[in-house]
Each structure stands twice: as structure tokens, then as C-alpha cells.
Amino acid sequence: MQIRKILVFSILTLLLLIGIDIAVSRFFNGVFKKLESGRYHKNKFTLYENTSELLVVGSSVGEDGIYPPILADTLGMTCWNGSREGQTILFYLAVAEKTLERYKPKLVVQLVEMDHMETAVEKRGVERLKPFAHTDPELRKYIYYHNRYRRWLAFSGLVSYNSIYLHLWRPLLHKADIYPPDGLGFIPNSGRYTIPPSAKTDFSDYVMRPLEDTQIDLHTKLLDKYSQANVPLVLVMVPYCTPGPSTTSTIEKLKEWDKEREDMILLNYWDDKRFVGHTEFFYNDNHLNTDGAMSFTKIIAHDIKEWLKQHPDWLDSPKGISTP
């Protein structure tokens, strides 16, 4: 009799939890449908709706550092900035996969940072795509990359919306999360950075860190995804305000790929004197303010345009043009 009571109690508790889970999912699904902006809608548009000719992908340094209307006007292409804060390679792979399922962009601009291939693969950022894991099994391999046995949790609303602050309350409370409709995915930032007196300026003792094998494999997979779809790729190394070492292991690997691969080019602004030390362009050490974003995007647009002038067939046949 005691065993029966425990069994009945367990079943009723499980049913109650399932009911709560379903109610949570329906509630937040309904709320998100009524929101007009915010991170959820930007991710949804980037993954499932965007068909721009030029796609920009990156982390926060891309989201507040690249102003798509300038790229669109200079290059004569429609443009969308699908960058999201806190993202790294798993998010970039997810965007590439979902984009190429729908259509073939004319050009992809992928922002990269100076040390991303020297650190372990992060899971924190891509988990913000959990609200889409319930209906999209292809995303689960990236969201649950570090623990694939947890993929079945994608069916739980409580799990899917466990980063609800970033998706719902932050856009309602933080005006910077409301994307200007004419910014095409760009988030403006104001303020001016002040380099602290304690900032390091002598890097003569800098020792380059080893590359992570997993990072190399995943970044190679990203390049190959676009290459197999015959989509040309521009890798953009973002500048920092505070001077740093002249190079890193990540930068050297990207330079190596730039020489070896015909389907991509590297635009390296890591130590660009037009930005390093120019606090008027930054609101912190590695994030541009609005003035900096406008200047940076103009430079990128100009450099891409010049490259295309010299290699007019590259957009149509990126594998057939050798980079210098």
C-alpha cells in the first residue's frame, strides 16, 4: 500500500510539473509574440527570416561596431547585422547553418577577436538560443554542445526560458536593447572611454598562447560551411583602444588561412593606428561608441569595395580567386 501511495504521488507530481512547464511555455510564447523588439526577435529574424545580400555576424563588438546602412550604401547590397552580445563560434555556426538552409548571401562579414582560438569553447552565449531549441532540433547540437545528453531538455519550457532576463525583461528595462528599425540590427552606444593609468603598454615579455584544437576545428568548419555554399567570407579583426601585443596566435592562424584559402579574406584592424589610443571612438576598451562604429564601418566598406574592384569575379566565384 505504501509503495502504491508513493507511486501515485510521484505520478501526480510529475503531471503537475509537466502542466506548469506547458503553462510557462505558452505564457512566454504569447508574451514574445507581442514584443516588437529585443534579443528574442533579433535572433528569430537572423535565424529564420533574414534574406539580406550581406550578412554581418559577430559578438557585441559587431552588434555595436558595424552600422549596416553604410555597408549597404557603399557596396550596393541589402545588409543585416545579426551579431549578438556574448557570442562565439557555436553561435556563428548556428547562424551559418540556418542561413544557408534558406538562401545564399552574396557576402558574409564575420567579426573575429584577437584571442578567440586560444580559449576553451564557451557555452554561456549560445545557450541564449534555448527558446528556439524546442522547435528546431538542428540548433540543439550547438546549444547542448558541451552536454549532448541534455538535448531532451529542449522540450521543457522551464529550461528553454531559463535566460528569460536577457530575452524579455532586459529589453523592457534597458533601452539599448530596443533595436532602431533603421539600424538593421545595430545597437548604438554612447560615452567615451578613458584609458586607466594602470593599463599595460610594454609587451616585450608577451608570450603567445597555444591554440585550442577544438577551436581550430570549429572555425575550420565555419569557413568550410560558407565555402561549400560558394559564399565569399570576409573576416574582420576588430580594433582595441588600449595598445596590445603586435600579434597573437589567433591572428597568426587567421593570416595563415588568408594566404592558403581563396574563399575568404582577412581585414586586420587589431593594431590600426586610426583606432588604437583614440578614446573618442570607444566606450570601453574593445567596444566602439556610435562615432567609432560609423568610422569603422566606413573603413571596412571602403576596403571591401576596393577588394571587389580588384577582384570583380570574387562574389560569384570565391574559390577561384587567389588572395595576395
Image (spheres, helix red, strand yellow):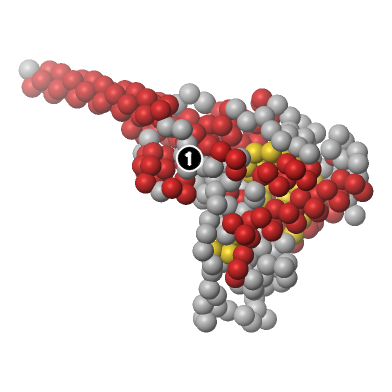
Quadrant hosting residue 303:
bottom right
Please identify the quadrant where the C terminus is shown. bottom right
Q: Residues within 10 Å of mark 1 (few under 14, many from 20)?
A: many
Percent x, y for residue 95?
A: 61, 36
Image quadrant in which you'd find residue 253 = bottom right
Seen at 39% across and 39% down, the residue is: 168
Q: Nearer the viewer, residue 119 or 125?
A: 125
Q: Position of residue 224 (x, y in %)?
A: 74, 39
> In the image, what residue occupies the spot 61% across and 51% down?
62
Q: What percent of the width, then of the height, locates residue 132?
A: 48, 30
Report the residue marked by disc 1: 39
Q: Is 66 on the left or on the right of 235, as rendered?
A: left
**Image vertical order of residue 41 relative to residue 243, above or below:** above
In this rendered view, identify the residue nearer to me: 252 or 321: 321
At x 87%, y 45%, the residue is 308
Q: Quadrant of residue 287?
A: bottom right
Q: Would residue 154 be found to the left or right of residue 78 on screen?
A: left
Q: Residue at x 80, y 53 (%)?
A: 302
Residue 137 against residue 62 in the figure, above or below = above
Q: Is residue 131 left or right of residue 27?
A: right
Q: Secondary structure at mark 1?
A: helix
The answer to whether residue 224 is visible is no
Q: Which residue is at the front of the view, 275 or 158?
A: 275
**Quick check: can you spot residue 46?**
yes
* Quadrant of the image containing the N terminus: top left
Count up the numbered dots.
1
Is residue 77 shown left or right of residue 81? right
Q: Is residue 295 above or below residue 36?
A: below
Callout 1 amino acid: Arg
Task: List x then y, in percent, for residue 276.
Answer: 67, 70
Q: Is residue 139 above or below residue 169?
A: above
